[in-house]
Every structure is written in C-alpha cells, then in structure tokens.
Amino acid sequence: MKAFYKDFKLGILGGGQLGRMLIQACPNLDIHTCVLDPSPLAPCAGIATEFFQGDLQDFATVYEFGKRVDLLTIEIENVNVEALYLLEKEGLQVCPQPRVIETIQDKRKQKQFYQEHGIPTAEFVLVDDLADIRKHSDFLPAFNKLGVGGYDGGGVVRLDSATNLEKAFDAPGLLEKAVDMDREISVIAARNAHGDVAVYPIVECVFHAEHNLVDYLISPSTLSNELQNQAIEIASSLVQKLEIIGLLAVEMFVSRSGEILVNEVAPRPHNSGHQTINANVTSQYEQLLRAILNLPLGSTAINRPSAMVNLLGEAGHTGPVHYSGLNKLLLIPGVHLFLYGKAETRPFRKMGHVTIVDEDRNKLIEKVAQVKQTIKAVTLQEQESQA
C-alpha cells in the first residue's frame, strides 16, 4: 500500500457528521480525502478534498468511486457490499472488511454471530413477517427489530403483548426479549491488521425516551470495576472474533441482576465516542486512522471526566436552522460545541453535539441540564417572528 503521507487518497463512503469529524483528523497525517454521498449538501461536502455525489447502494457508483482511492472506509453501514467485495478481490484495502459490514448490516446475522461465538446477548427469535411474530406472542414483551434498514433509533418497536402487534414490522427481523435494565453503556474498540487491540473506557448512555437515540452520555462510568472490566473484555473479544480492521462500537445493556449483554454494534466511529476528541488521549477518529493504516494504536486513557449532549432539532421546527442561545452556551466553562454543517433542521435530527469537561462529576451532570436548556436548533422563520 502507498505510504499514507505520499499522495495517499482515503475514500470515505458516507458524508455525514461522522465522516466530517474523521476528515478533521486527517490533516495531521497529511491525508487527502475523497467522499461519496447521495446529498450535495452532506456535512462533508465543503471540507473533503474531493467530494462526489452518488448512491451508496448502487454497485457501479461504489465500485467506480473505490477505483479512485488507495484505501476505502465507511461512516455508515448501508452501502453496496457486492462492490466492496469486488474491490477487495482486485486488491483495494477495504476497512472494515466487506464480510464484517455484511454481517453487521443485518441484525439477524449479528445476533447469530453473537450466539455462535459465545458473546452474551439477550434471548431472541428470528421472525420472517407479522404472521411469524403472532406465532411467538408468548415471547413478549420484546423488541421487534428490522433485520436491515433500521438506523438511528428507527426500525425498532417495543411489543408488550399480542394486543399491540399493529406496531410490529411485517418484514424479516427478530424479537429480542426485553431486559430488566439498570443502564445502557457503550464501549469502543479498535483493531489494526497486526491484531493489536485498544479498548476505550465505557461510557454510560441516557436515551431519549421517545426517539430511541442517545440524549446524552457521561464518562467515566460509576459501575463497579468488575462490571467495567467485564464489558471491556466482551468488546475486546468481539473485535478479535470478528477480526475487524478499524473501529467497533459495542452497545450493551447492564441488567439489574448485573448481567452485561451486547445489544448492537457499529463498525465505524460512533455517537458514543464524540467526547473522546476533548476528553481522551486519542480521539476515536485518530484511532480509526491508526487502525486502518496499520499504525500503532493510541492510548485510550481518559484525560478528564466528560459528558456529551446531542444537539437535536427542536420539535415543530423544519427549515433553515438557527442556533438560539449559542453565545450563552459558550460562556459555560468546559463546553465545546460541534456543529455538523446541516443547513436545515427538522424535529430530532442530529444537528451537532456539545462536549463538556469537568473534574467534578456532579457539575458535569448539572451542566448537561444547563446545556440542554441553553442551546436550541430552531428555524430562522421562528427566530425572526420572535424578534
């Protein structure tokens, strides 16, 4: 492979905020970035060295894009895997590997992988359609998950009993037994081609009650050392069994009985690792570059306790975005604002995030509430009508 500092082109499939933050880590290694995304207004469009508009699911588009670059990675899983297999066969390094992406694209295959490799996960049954779900009504309460296509909280519904099956998906998926949960955590692990593994300390995630995506997270965790070590060991085992080259974000449940169960994984940078930019020795984005370039992995140690608040579009606001309260936000000590370059907001769209660092965990939690009250992603029309 061409040396990364000699006219090296890194291809990124997907031009969203994860790609944007990955690009922001590239100049330190003098890496030329090429991005493919279906939207000309994608967050990466204005900052990639080269930007191409195209369908990530189209074989020819992905294949031709791959021929332009020296190494290909992803910031979203929903890509054409057949094109990646062919590019890999022809000698292009694809990270994570197509077989890993293919396994993770389908939650059914994910769950079967955990089961076959001794990775602890909640009890589940595979279902083909609504009629199949009805046959397993005695398995409820459970979460019905689409096999493919669900993203950012979509494709998941809770089914409490046979009386609310109208919410179920009439498509291939699974039923996952509801866990008596104490909290949700995430662990990000990295692996390079040498087989070296580095695992970040766990973060605790608090999810939005209605939209099933992270509201905020906090690091470090207050779980016992025993449980933290167990979670880290599970993540380390999983990246090694997948033999992934790159990053793997492992979302887990901690049950009230102290059991740790893998929920889902993502083979890319993850929302639960944004705070590493400000709070850890090595950010998840630099770590991804180190892993796919087969460089020594960086330290994952925490420099300072941190929290991360997702900045979501406000309910009832669709249109050109205005960030109200921005000046007040930046007066809060320890606050770091990241805007994703999305011109238009809509309800609960991820528009940015705020990282908070503070040595005092109680103050971190207080500042989370303060941040959520201070900055809002609203529409320009609404802002003008209030002026």
Image (cartoon, rainbow, N blue to C red):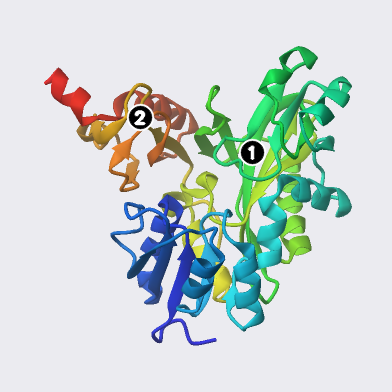
Observer-nearest residue: 351 or 218?
351
In the image, 175: left or right of 101?
right
Measuring from the top left, give residue 320's x and y in whole percent. Answer: 25, 36
Q: Using the image, tell me which numbered label, if any, was put on residue 185.
A: 1
Q: Which quadrant is the N terminus positioned in?
A: bottom right
At a point 38% along the width and 53% down the height, the residue shown is: 39
In the image, 219: left or right of 233?
left
Amino acid at pointer 2: Val
Measuring from the top left, give residue 103's x and y in whole percent. Answer: 72, 56
Residue wearing tag 2: 371
At a point 56% along the width and 66% down the height, the residue shown is: 59
Amino acid at pointer 1: Ile
Mark 1 neighbour density, 10 Å: few (under 14) some (14–19) many (20 or more): many
Q: Earlier in the sequence, mark 2 or mark 1?
A: 1
Mark 2 neighbour density, 10 Å: few (under 14) some (14–19) many (20 or more): many
Observer-nearest residue: 253 or 362?
253
In the image, 285: left or right of 222?
left
